[in-house]
Amino acid sequence: MSKPQANSKEPSGKKIQAIRGMNDLLPDQSPLWQYFEGQMRALMGRYGYDEIRTPIVEQTALFKRSIGEVTDIVEKEMYTFEDRNGDSLTLRPEGTASCVRAAMEHGLLHNQTQRLWYQGPMFRHERPQKGRYRQFHQVGVETFGLEGPDIDAELILLSARLWKQLGLFEHVTLELNSLGSPEARAAYRDTLVAYFEQHMEVLDEDSRRRLATNPLRILDAKNPDMAPMLADAPRLMDHLDAESKEHFERLTAILDEAGIAYTINPQLVRGLDYYSRTVFEWTTTALGSQGTVCAGGRYDGLVEQLGGKPVPAVGFAMGIERLILLLDTLDLVPDEARGDLDVYLLPMSEATESAALLLGERLREAHPELRVQLHCGGGSFKSRIKKADKSGARLALLLGEDELAENTVTLKFLREEREQQRLDQDALADTLASLLAGQA
Ligand code: ATP
Ligand code: MG
């Protein structure tokens, strides 16, 4: 038998680190994420949307066929690999394609409408920077079987309500455009290419490459040298088919009536191939160049493109990291999103440790919403008090041998100048409740 050998590929002592652009969510940030996710989940319920969860990995062909071969995502951002059977798989770069695949596969689109939402990690091989990561998280909404502008408007109102809930409404702006029908877009494409061909000297390399493959995307180029030429480009809005024009006018009329301000941005084309008619983005100026926090639109052709019967559809996705960053940057994190403890429960010595543990259980029984942490791990009196101070809790409950004998507990205020109090254990739950409700 051969001797077991050390793995020679592993350099000894070198620490293994996370993959670039893929972040750990640490305990100091997770309460804020939970707060955001809680707001989101509640909102979806209020509008009657149902959650769908799909696998993180799909067949590569799904994304190629839906997002489009000549998009940034498919050309250069996907995490694609062969599994052990030799099948080409891809870590999902976005949620819409998976959602459509699942809805088709399980017959959710047969003569019915669907309003779905999802959330989870997405993967794109991009250059990591603030607000742009290789694993990031989206919350998305997809609706199926509804073709009128009322549902487009609902999605915008739903997102506007989220901004209001989070205190972000004053910090974001809505941009809208219509991409029309595929036929109108094809005709416009020729007009646009003709225009660009007259301005070849201004087009950068990337845009020249796109001229043959995806000329509409040139409108979205960020190169400032091209800006004046792009501003004068023919507008898709002026080449819409009659139905799309009416659809768009009805959408803007609803938004006007609802008091939602928007700007029409003729250069808004979105990076994915499957859109038609309405496209929109919510952007902020508070995050530098990663300013789009929510983006979506209508994709009436996608279900058919993936082999189903035509089903109208519209949806959006928002980037959770950017929204969290925005809440942090604008100092809009409410107390409830800080995850602070209410009570640090402190046995003063070993003799009262088990009594403290039971007291903690009684408190949690009486007040399920109370956040109580028990001091564990012993230590000197001084180090116990230090732990209580560092816990971030508002209150400490001290249980010494005297207290134990009297069936009382000492209440200490950790964040306010206030006299400590000796309380009867049986009255404790009520006292805490009124204290934390701000009534005492
Ligand atoms: P961008 O123009 O910023 O690259 P995109 O058009 O590629 O965005 P979508 O595919 O529409 O973005 O995704 C919707 C939202 O998801 C974006 O508006 C953004 O908030 C977020 N998002 C997209 N890519 C990333 C990423 N790499 N890291 C973090 N968030 C992202
Ligand atoms: Mg992108």
Image: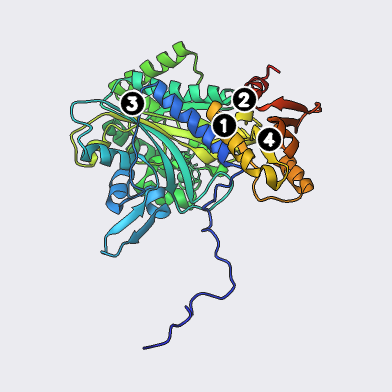
Binning the other alpha carbons within 10 Å of mark 1 as few (below 14), some (14 to 19) or many (20 upward) gives some
Q: CA distance from mark 3 to mark 1?
A: 67 Å
Residue 432, given in percent of the width and then of the height, sits at 65, 24
Marks 3,2: beta carbons within 8 A? no
Q: If you read the primary sequence from the N terminus, does the residue marked by circle 2 or circle 4 appear first?
A: 4
Residue 273, given in percent of the width and then of the height, sits at 34, 41
Q: CA distance from mark 1 to mark 4?
A: 19 Å
Q: CA distance from mark 3 to mark 4?
A: 60 Å
> What residue sits 27% from the left and 51% below the top?
61
Residue 225 is labelled as none
Q: If you read the primary sequence from the N terminus, does the residue marked by circle 3 or circle 2 appear first?
A: 3
Marks 2,1: beta carbons within 8 A? yes
> What residue sits 66% from the left and 33% below the top?
343
Q: Amino acid at mark 4?
A: Ala
Residue position marked by numbered label 4 in the rendering: 393
Q: Amino acid at mark 3?
A: Leu
Binning the other alpha carbons within 10 Å of mark 4 as few (below 14), some (14 to 19) or many (20 upward) gives many
Residue 303, given in percent of the width and then of the height, sits at 24, 37
Residue position marked by numbered label 2 in the rendering: 429
Q: Is residue 210 left or right of residue 432?
A: left
Residue position marked by numbered label 1 in the rendering: 362
Residue 240 is labelled as 3
- SS at mark 1? helix
Q: Amino acid at mark 1?
A: Arg
Q: Nearer the viewer, mark 3 or mark 4?
A: 4
Q: If you read the primary sequence from the N terminus, does the residue marked by circle 3 or circle 1 appear first?
A: 3
